Image (cartoon, helix red, strand yellow):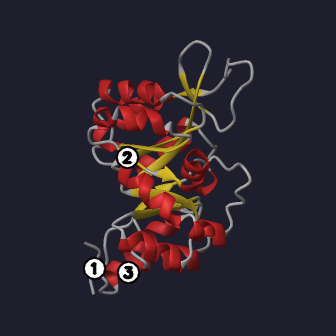
Amino acid sequence: MKLKQTMITAHSGCDGTPENSLDFVRYALSIGIDSFEVDVNIGNNGILYINHEQDPTGVYKGCTTLEEVMKLMLSSEFVKINCDLKSYNIENDVLKMAKYFKIIDRLIFSGSINLNFVRENRSLFETADIFLNVEKILREQIKLNSINNNQVEIIIFSKEIINTCRELNVNIVNINEKLCTDLFLEKMKMNGIGVSVWTVDDPDRIMFFLKKEIENITTRNAVLAMKLKQGLINNGNKLC
């Protein structure tokens, strides 16, 4: 049986590297990973920085810039970058930089994506991918801040998730792996929507999602995940 290609994304700081650092990026580019993730914020000087938390001063002293990261990406032709947006309304800034470095076809958006921006400017994304975070969809569409993001609620509101993806012409959702059940996967598959899960570090769970043929697995155990993926190939379950 042929399995569909599952992307393996190296979570920032994977395999013991410093989070949101150039050392992490160099490492990710060196191990044959499919994609790597960085957290993107914007400083009060308009510069994009990679840092998980927003700096209330807007200075981001000592933080790596997204420009530095994308320059490093020029050493590789295929590895993608997943920009997990932590600041709001920076989609266009990230798009412009990716276009400048001519890597927009290797760009993935996730995190705090402005759904209205996507709705009004869908053509700007060209070949860039969008992984819509499930909790973002629910809070935007239902205007219900009390959603607890438990497995039952995710299934109850799966119709809203599907409808939002169709409206925005987005075909991949991003979900916490603890909330991703067989039923959720089945509902998404029936509606032609791929699933990306984060953050999957346990080997058994990585293998579970590989066999489910989902679109993407984000993991801190990047080398392990790649070996498990390769193991499926070597055992005759050839990935397309």
Residue 73 lies in quadrant: top left
Q: Secondary structure at mark 1?
A: loop
Q: Residues within 10 Å of mark 1 (few under 14, many from 20)?
A: some
The residue mark sitting in front, 2 or 3, is 2
In the visual, does 33 lie left or right of 156?
A: left
Q: Residues within 10 Å of mark 3 (few under 14, many from 20)?
A: some
Q: Residue at x 61, y 19 (%)?
A: 43
In the rendered structure, are the residues bearing label 1 and label 2 in contact, judged by CB atoms less than 8 Å apart? Answer: no
> Which three-letter amino acid code belongs to the residue tagged 2?
Leu
Which residue position is annotated with label 1?
A: 238
Mark closer to the chain start, 1 or 3: 3
Mark closer to the chain start, 1 or 2: 2
Q: Is residue 240 above or below residue 129?
A: below
x and y, in percent, of residue 226 in the image: 44, 67
Q: How far apart are the alpha carbons under marks 1 and 3?
A: 7 Å
Question: Could you say which disc has been placed on residue 232 in the image?
Answer: 3
> Which three-letter amino acid code belongs to the residue tagged 1?
Lys
x and y, in percent, of residue 44 in the image: 62, 15
Tell which of 58 and 140 is nearer to you. 140
Which residue position is annotated with label 2?
A: 168
Q: Residue at x 53, y 36 (%)?
A: 22
